[in-house]
Amino acid sequence: MANPVLTFTQQGIFCPAGDFHIDPWRPVGRALITHGHADHARPGHGAYLATHAALPVIRHRLGDIRAEGIAYGERRRIGDAVVSFHPAGHLPGSAQVRVEVGGQVWVVSGDYKLESDGLSEPFEPVRCHAFITECTFGLPVFRWAPQAEVAAEINAWWAANAAEGRTSILGAYSLGKAQRLLSLVDPGIGSILTHGAVENTNAVLRAQGYALPDTVAVTPDTKGKDFPGALVIAPPAALGSAWARRFAGASTGFASGWMRLRGVRRRRAADRGFVISDHADWDGLHQAIRQTEAEKVFVTHGYTDIFSRWLNANDCSAQVVPTEFGTDEEDAA
Amino acid sequence: MKDFATLFTRIDQTTKTTVKTRALADFFKTANDTDKLWTIALFSGRRPKRAVTTTQLREWAAERAGLPLWLLEESYPIVGDLAETLALMLPPAEKSEDRPLTYWISELLTLQALPLEDRRARILDAWDRLEATERFLFNKLITGGFRIGISQKLMTRALAQATGQDEATLALKLMGAWTPETASFASLIEADDPQADDSRPYPFYLAYQMDGGPDPLGDPADWQAEWKWDGIRGQLILRGGGHHLWSRGEELITDRFPELARATDFLPQGTVIDGEIVTWDGTQPMPFATLQPRIGRKSVPKKLLREAPVLMLAYDLLEQDGRDLREAPLADRRAALDALLAGLPPDAPLRPSPLIAFDDWQTLTETRGEARDRHAEGVMLKRRASPYLAGRKKGDWWKWKLDPLTVDAVMIYAQQGHGRRANLFTDFTFAVRDGNDLVPFTKAYSGLTDAEFAEITRWVRKNTLQRFGPVRQVRPEHVFEIAFEGIQASPRHKSGIALRFPRMARWRHDKSVDEANTLDDLRALLAAHG
């Protein structure tokens, strides 16, 4: 690969042939954005390109930006490169970016998970020569149970609390995880309340046509006792804050892949930790890499040193690429 | 073991002590006697003898999981717990059955007599018959250190709730050198008059930390002051013709401090003394660092006995002539202690911890300022009328420590934490300035809030200069105030200095690297306090 399709620069992942960056972390002229999380969609770029499904949230978060939408699978020429976006299954609108230059195909995974969550466009493997993959959970101790099992656990916890008149507060990142949980919980158990940050995102996604159950936004006047046995979905930072005090005596839970580790569960000091992630687990990472049939793998963000060593020991040529992804990752994961 | 796994899950899923106690009390009401006894044993630091090494466990688990050993080894520090790492890596159980806790412990006890190959087969078979949580607990039984958020105190309270017995009585019954193989639930817990055990200590009475000054304590005449020594708390028991020494962690440490054997030459049987074990240079305690090598060793080489001899600075008398004195006021106990120790020759292995004379709090405050020179951490204040209670009780006993020493230092290396802090950078190396160089002198792991750890983690990710395995060299930019309790010359450290209990007291956002302390500043502290 004398002329690599993508290079790794101070600004982020760069395509010399097309003069654009993918999820750059410093301001650049043209940015292709995989999804709306803050560590991937940053402010200050000259022009943005993202999927039609991802754009509304990105606009909502970044305000007045010069941005263009693209359909999944649509091929577009930028300079000497041809790019297309493919579902990553991470959250609604999220994408992997495929870049083709002179017959060489490279794919940037962004963040992804393989299991279909029923809300996001399901992950599609893309064949390529080189695959730049995240490996947030690139250790064999990270394995996820099927979504239905975790959903049953969450509903059982909520129902048990509701039966005793207790509120259940579930901490989850306001974009992605919160909506996934909303689509998993059983609205028959009780009212569902949301923190403002979650509800703002809900409004954007509902307007796009994503199906979410009815929710009640918590306002400064909301009193916990008016909603006995309700489920409250809020960003992790809101738990234990003054905001949460209105739900006195509530049972608290967190929903994240990190909850697989008992130590992290305990640091969170929540009553329950639900192991549910929007990132690929150990097996998922392997399956994704295998399906790309890539000759070369670049791993970024996560347990990169260990994961690349493992790949190299298993006939997969891998190397570590340092990135600045991962802000608030623990909450998002 | 499903009921035990349920108990664990209930305990692990709550942060509320009352809920944990209730879960454990429920278990004590329903489990069979041997399961109860083993549960008591596990939560009081008694575990079955280890039948396989952790090295063997790692190898077998890696093999069963079809993964190389190095991958398990790399995962372990991130998970932070070997038993959990193995449980998470192993493939799901093929069959599950419900056997009581004692069954699985008996399995482990049986292993000791078997050849290695059979042990391996039995462990692999057990992993196949246990569900995720049970498997984690089974691994915990093997690897020991059964710490899952239940203190002995909490366990004792739950047992008190379940049996209707008094908590302090139970605490006394649970002390001593019993094991589930030598005791039964009936003999240990239910019997009214448990078999007399000469070695059995009294539960230690622990002081509360005093913040702010002693003014709220009222009339100084009601209080007794002593130095707060920087040694290890011990209870010396002379009964049945011999002697026993217990640490505050309720560990029998008699053999580690053979100097105290001579106490039997000077003191009558039926005596129990509470005091501080310190290394002694003939006139005063030596720094804690000299005691450290004595703590870890079960037997003591002659050289160490010569270089770091210990004695006990006695401060309370709990039993005299076989009579429990704990209800008597401290002033009376102390008078009896002084009378008992009066006239002991200078080479006796114990002497009274001197009382500090003071007429008012101002005088005491000034005397406390001398603590560091006397190799003490501060002063103790004890109400003269106080009985000797069990555990940490507020009101009558206070420790009033000196403010720590501090140095402003530059962060130069960062490493991810493990366990509770697996995905944060929490382990840092700090340096002081030396001309244009930065000389590392200490590590510190604690003292920041979760929000500060999250902030520094984000910063470290963006400001890594070099990686050395898990260690990242970071841009020298941030200054932290490092607090510590003592400073020692140390040829093993590059800076020539070792700190006692260093931690991050404050993140000095207001200071630049140029304003950090220098190696000369550290040397001055060493000269003053070393």
Image (cartoon, rainbow, N blue to C red):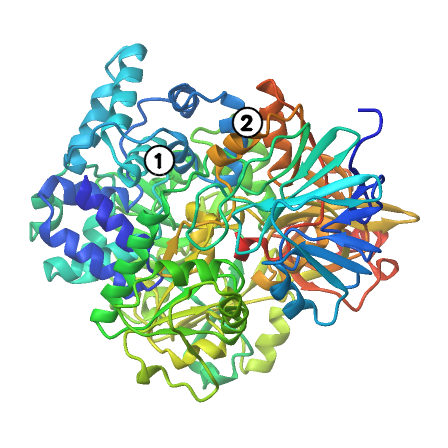
What amino acid is found at the position of numbered circle 2 in the picture? Arg
**Alpha-carbon span between mark 2 and mark 1:** 40 Å
B353 displayed left or right of A59: left
Q: Are marks 2 and 1 on the same chain?
A: no
Q: Quadrant of residue B360?
A: bottom right
Please tell me whether residue B401 is drawn above or below residue A85 in the rendered image. below
Q: Chain of mark 2?
A: A
Q: Chain of mark 1?
A: B
B150 displayed left or right of B96: right
Q: Where the N terminus of chain B falls, by quadrant?
A: top left
B451 displayed left or right of B334: right
Q: Quadrant of residue A332?
A: bottom right
User: Where does label 1 land, which residue?
Assistant: B144
Q: Outermost residue, right direction?
A: B435
Report the front residue among B164 and B147: B147
Residue at horizontal 19 percent and vertical 42 percent from the top: B2
- Element type at mark 2: helix
Q: Is residue B146 visible?
A: yes
Q: Quadrant of residue B392?
A: bottom left
Please tell me whether residue A240 is drawn above or below residue B344 in the rendered image. below
B145 displayed left or right of B467: left
What amino acid is found at the position of numbered circle 1 in the picture? Gly
On the image, the x and y values in percent for residue A295 come to 66, 23
Label total for image: 2
Residue at horizontal 56 percent and vertical 32 percent from the top: B306
Report the front residue among B324 and B521: B521
User: Where does label 2 land, which residue?
Assistant: A290
On the image, the x and y values in percent for residue B93 come to 27, 30
Please tell me whether residue B516 is drawn above or below residue A5 in the rendered image. below
Q: Is residue B282 visible?
A: no
